[in-house]
Image: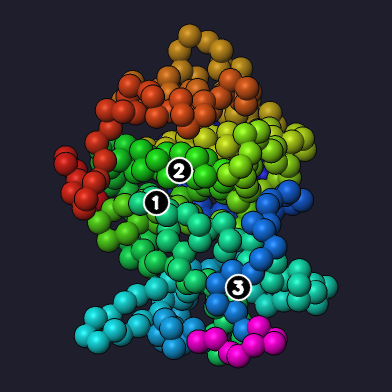
Amino acid sequence: KKDADAKSSASSTLRDMIMGSAPKLSRRGSNTSAGNRSDGGSKKGGSESGKGGGETASLLKKYGVCEKAAIGKGATAVVRLAHKWDRSTEKLYAVKEFRKRRKNETEKEYVKKLTSEFCISSTLHHLNIVETVDLVQDENRHWCEVMEYCPGGDLYAAIKRGGMSQAEVECCFKQIINGIAYLHSMGVAHRDIKPENLLLDAVGHIKITDFGVSDVFRMCWEKSTHYSKGLCGSEPYIAPEQFEHKEYDARLVDVWAAAVVFYCMQFQELPWRVAKMSDPTFKEFVHQYHGSNAPSPLNNLSPRECRPLLKKMLCPDPKGRYMTEDILKDPWFQSISVCENNVAPDHKH
C-alpha cells in the first residue's frame, strides 16, 4: 500500500495521526519489483510428492487439522493455525498456505519460488527467528510452509494497542537487532523488516518472520559480499538508496528499517511517509542530519543516550550507516536488559 508524498509538517502527534495529518502507522504491503534475491539453491526442500515416487505424509497427518479462519493474510499466502494431538499434548503450528500457481508460471518456476523461501528460512535457528519446520502439500495439493506458532501476535498490533513501557520498547529493539545480526552472520538479509513481520511468542520473545524477499548476500564459503538490487519491502521502512534503482548493501537496508521500527514503538507513528526528498519531513531530516544535535524527528527519542545510535542507523548515506556489528558495540545498546530464559528482569510483556 503506497502512500502519497507527505504534505504534513515535521511535527506530528498521535492526535494528528488519528486525525489523518501525520504519517499514519498502518499495516503495510510489500513492494517486490525486480529484486535480485537468491533462490536459495535449486534443490527442493521439505516434504514433497515426487512424480516418480510414493506419496509423502500429508499436512493433515503430520501436523493436524487447520482452522478455516486465517490468523494472517498477505499478498502471496494465508496463514492458518494447525492443531496436532500427540497423546495428551496439543501442539500448535502456523501453516502458511501459498498462493496457487499463476497461469503465466511454469510448475518449475512456481515451485522454485516457494522452495527458495523455505531453503533460506529452514536453515535459520535462533531465539529471535521464527522456526521453519517443513514444506508440505495439503490434501488439495496446495503448498504449505509449517512454522512455529507465536501466540503473542505481531508487533504492529502491540504498538497500536499502546502502553508499551520504555523498558519493553528497548527490550524488543534489542531482540530485533540480535535477530538481524544473526541473519547477517548467516549471509542473509531480510529486506522487509517491519512490525507486521515481527512476532511475539508466549513470553515476549520477538521472532522475525516472512523471508519471501530475503536475499543471500554471501555464501558460507565466500568472503566477499554480493550487492542486491530492486525495490522491495514496505514503503515507510525502505532505505533511501533503494529508490535510486542501483545496487545496494542489503544489510544496511535491514538496519535502516529496524531504526524506523524503534521510532514506531516509541511514538505509535512513522517518522516520515517515505524516505525521499519529496517528503517534507524526510527532507528536513536530511538537511539537519549533519548538525551537532539529533535531527528532527529523532530529537524527541528517549532516552537521550539512544539518539547517537539511532542517528547512525538512519544515516541517509549508506556509507556512513552502522552495520549490526557497530550497533552491538554501542554502550547504550549493551546496557539494555532483555528477556532471557523466559524471565524479564525489570519489565513484563
Badge 2 element: helix
Marks 2 and 1 in Cβ contact (< 8 Å): yes
| Label of residue 126 in the image | 1
Distance Cα–Cα, label 2 vs label 1: 7 Å
- Outermost residue toward the right? 104
What's the residue at 35%, 83% (across, down)? 84
Q: Is residue 84 visible?
A: yes
Q: Amino acid at mark 1?
A: His
Check residue 182 in the rendering and tell me which mark sits there, or answer none. 2
Q: Which residues are magenta?
A: 50-57
Residue type at numbered disc 2: Tyr
**Dot in front, 2 or 3:** 2
Q: Is residue 63 above or below residue 158?
A: below
Q: Residues within 10 Å of mark 2 (few under 14, many from 20)?
A: many
Q: Residue at x 42, y 81 (%)?
A: 63
Disc 1, SS: loop
Q: Nearer the viewer, mark 3 or mark 1?
A: 1
Q: Tell me the quarter of the picture where residue 220 sits.
A: top right
Residue found 33% across the figure and 21% down from its top = 331
| Cα–Cα gap, marks 2 and 3 | 26 Å
Q: Is residue 224 above or below residue 45?
A: above
Label drawn at residue 98: 3
Q: From the viewer's side, name the closer residue of 155 and 220.
A: 220
Judge left or right: residue 14 versus residue 338: right
**Image location of residue 224, percent across then percent down:** 65, 33
